[in-house]
Amino acid sequence: ANFPLAPALRWSTLRTMALIVNGEHIDDDIIEGEFRTIKGHYERTLQVACCERDPEFRAMAKDNLASRILLHQEAVKRVPDVPDETVSERLTRLIAQTGSEEQFYMQIGMPANDESLIRDQVANGARMDQMMHETHLEMLEERKAMLMDQMRLLSRRATVLQRAITVFYIA
């Protein structure tokens, strides 16, 4: 998959059913990594072993991955190109936030020599941010239009009410 995901954990004893989202195959190792993240979260939160809930956690992992893939696919559709300078600026900011390039690569758990993959992930983040920003603006415009319609309706009702009151006092 060309989708930004945490490094997958290797496992060999158990395989799950493949996950395919709009033709994009999600490797079993990625599903397993997501499953382990979810299971670990619940085990830490509940402070118990949750083996009996493994099928539920696997379903959650697949749902999470499918949702992220669908969002990513939509973002690529809406924002197909991210300028290199945008990616470079974001990458520089991320490295600065962690203190150093070495700290950055250690924190994300990826080797520094895989710059193209990291740049792809940063571009995907920029793409997602832009899509969310545009979606938010669309929602605001729709909300603004609805509020304007409601204000016009209330204004007409106020005018009718004002005329009725005037007629009542004149009569």
Image: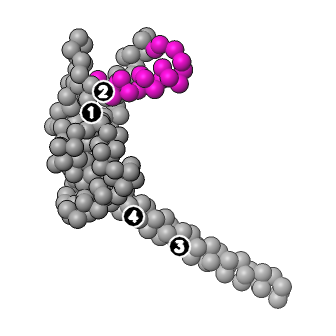
Location of residue 159 in the rendering, given as x and y in whole percent from the top left corner: 66, 81
From where the camera sits, is residue 52 visible? yes
Residue at image mark 3: 148
Residue at image mark 4: 138
Judging depth in this view, the residue of 14 and 7 nearest the camera is 7
Residue 7: mark in rendering? 1
- Camera-side mark, 4 or 2: 2
- Camera-side mark, 1 or 4: 1
Q: Quadrant of residue 59?
A: top left
* Residue neighbourhood size for the residue with mark 3, other residues' Cα within 10 Å, grouped as few (<14), some (14–19), many (≥20): few
Question: Are circles 2 and 1 on residues that touch, CB within 8 Å?
Answer: yes
Q: Is residue 138 left or right of residue 113?
A: right
Q: CA distance from mark 2 to mark 1?
A: 8 Å
Q: Give the magenta part as a residue range.
A: 32-50
Q: Earlier in the sequence, mark 4 or mark 3?
A: 4
Q: Quadrant of residue 2?
A: top left
Residue extending farthest to the bottom is 170
> Which residue: 46% across, 26% down?
41
Q: Earlier in the sequence, mark 4 or mark 2?
A: 2
* Secondary element at tag 3: helix
Q: Quadrant of the N terminus?
A: top left
- Camera-side mark, 2 or 1: 1
Q: Is residue 128 left or right of residue 150?
A: left
Q: CA distance from mark 4 to mark 2?
A: 35 Å
Q: Is residue 132 left or right of residue 8?
A: right
Q: Earlier in the sequence, mark 2 or mark 3?
A: 2
The residue under label 4 is which amino acid type?
Glu
- Examine the structure image and report whether residue 42 is included in the region drawn in magenta: yes
